Amino acid sequence: MSPIIHRAHERGISELGWLSSRFSFSFADYHNRERMGFGVLRVINDDRVQAGTGFGMHQHRDMEIVTLVIKGSLEHRDSEENHGIIHAGEVQYMSAGTGIYHSEHATDAEDTELFQIWIYPNMHGYSPRYEQRDFRSLLTERGWHTLVSGDGRDHSIQIRQNAQILISSLDASEKIETPNVEKDRGILLLVIEGQITIDATELSRRDELQITQEGTYTIEALQNSQVLLFDIPISER
């Protein structure tokens, strides 16, 4: 199967004044039946939240929710009495389980930019769980760094699904191999910043590539770049 490319300009768009969003998959008022997710990966929302504004209390259940803040700071509160400030370079994890209410607001200092990611869990009827972790010291180091995983490998946040999210920062002309794509799994590569090539395909800022063919693939940075990689079960739901 050939790789599937989603260019940045092809994503869904929502502009609410206080919130500017770009959707990789169908979400809210954006519906595209060709883009309903990738295996157990249901949502990648690229959000910019105006300083001092945010999402009021609302409920989630039966979803693994991962938030990566890339600029500014986000204040979290929830019905389990968790409260924290997530800074740029930190990752927040909320396992919604049987149900949790939460709010997220950009702090007053500046606008906040973040990726919110939803992954279907591999179990149901569990209690909600919350965690946040500081990965800032790793973001300038070479190689892949595991942010979340199903088994907590490499000091990552452990989620309730056999999925991984990895990040890597690359200098211009630097190369790196993807993890091996195994049977019934796929990888989705998202360019946060910069420009790369993979599998003879050039990707720029916020472009995405989905691969389900088994094997490893070489990424080469055409300029200083930062990429997210999702290693996802395709057939499990």
Image (cartoon, grey):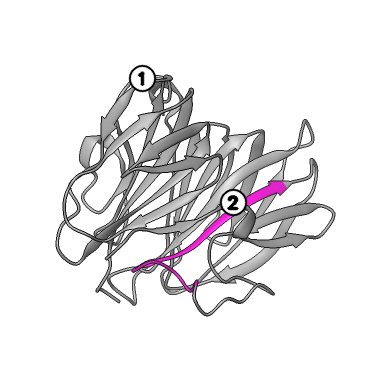
Examine the image and state in which quarter residue 87 appears.
top right
Q: Mark 1: which secondary structure? A: loop
The span shown in magenta is 35-48
Examine the image and state in which quarter residue 176 appears.
top left
Indicate whether 88 appears above or below 162. Answer: above
| 72 sits to left or right of 66 | right
Q: Which residue is mark 1?
A: 141
Contact, CB < 8 Å: mark 1 with mark 2? no
Q: Amino acid at mark 2?
A: Ala
Which residue is at the far right?
17
**Residue 164 location, x and y as percent?**
30, 50
The quarter of the picture where the N terminus appears is: bottom left
Indicate whether 150 appears above or below 197. Answer: below
Magenta segment includes 236: no
Q: Which residue is mark 2?
A: 8
Q: Residue at x 25, y 54 (%)?
A: 150
**Residue 157 location, x and y as percent?**
33, 44
